[in-house]
Image: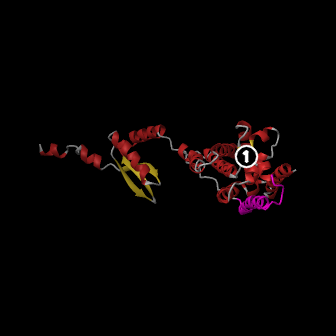
Amino acid sequence: MREGDASAPTPPARAAASEPDIEVYRSRGRRECEERAFVLAAVGIASEVLTFRGGWVLQVAAGNLAVAAEHLQQYERENPPRRPIPPPPPVRLFPRAWAGCLGYAAWLLGVAYVLSNGLVRLDAFERGDLYGAALRRGQWWRAWTCLTLHVSGAHLAGNMLAGVWFGYLAGRQFGAGTAWLLVVLGAGLANLLEGLLGPPGYRSVGASTAVFTALGMMAAHTWWQRRSLGRSWLRRWIPLGAGVVLLGWLGTAGRHTDIMAHLLGFSFGVLIGWAVAVPWIDRRLERVPQWLPGLAAMLIMAAAWACALA
């Protein structure tokens, strides 16, 4: 009987413990191995995560290698790797944005000085404001001349500071000359629409329409550029949402605030900012020397005042 006991087989538990561990997965980070260890544990397969040569490995018993590999392959099929979010393109900022701000300030201060000192015809203010009835009779220049007229020093100072601030930011984003040409065009078109659709006796002056045109341009341009980067919808819409918040905050304050002019200016700015963000338009505008659109903006304003004073 003792000889029979000596030839008895080794217990199964001792044989399993002697089997070597085999690598079934390797990664640079520990998290990936731990996720797959959790998957194997869910189907009853023991595993171990170890560091190895600067990385991490997941090991299972040799007898479980085939089954573990099959479950991990199924996991990979059901959980494909996420497409990495592309890094944002380098932000393009144009130099000398202050040059456009100087031109803006020179126009507002120059017109205020000339009119207040009677250096031109005495009815220049009345011939330059946005008067709906006169605009409908063909006096188109009022849509642009009204941008340089203000009823008080406080009115002038407020639009001066806001215009310089938003104009500088727009100049950095679009280029000083391009930004102010787009602002002049957008604000003038907004005034044209307001004068044509508003009451015939409607009158308005001030550069605030141009200020909100610049704001709308920047918001829409940034929104359009972000939408092509694969970001979440919240990140894509933040610039446009912030622009709308600023419009509501700054564009509705005050007793005699022309809310419609601010809304139209912002809307035209959004349309312009979206249009120039189209890649082939954006690339062509980038190659234009900034002095050229800047000169065009000044010529538009000069031609409008020449018609008003003729």
| 105 falls in the magenta region | yes
* Camera sees residue 33: yes
| Along the viewing direction, whichever of 227 and 125 lies nearer the viewer | 125
Q: Secondary structure at mark 1?
A: helix
Residue positioned most to the front: 122
Q: Residue at x 38, y 52 (%)?
A: 49
**Relative to 122, is 194 above or below?**
above
Observer-nearest residue: 214 or 124? 124
Answer above or below: position of 116 versus 217: below
Q: Is residue 143 left or right of residue 232?
A: right
Residue depicted at 48% across the width and 38% down the height? 77
> Left or right: where does residue 57 sit relative to residue 173?
left
Q: Residue at x 80, y 58 (%)?
A: 291
The residue where tag 1 is placed is 186
User: Residue 198 location in percent, x, y?
Assistant: 70, 38
Extreme residue toward the left, this view = 1
Q: Main secondary structure of the magenta part?
A: helix
Magenta segment boundaries in residue numbering = 94-123
Q: Nearer the viewer, residue 246 or 283?
A: 246
Tell me if I can see residue 92 in this picture: no
Which is more toward the observer, 70 or 140?
A: 140
Amino acid under disc 1: Gly
- Residue 258 horizontal/vertical position (percent): 64, 46
Quarter location, residue 51: bottom left
- Whether residue 191 appears in magenta in the rendering, the answer is no
**What residue is rendered at 79% in x and 56% in y?**
294
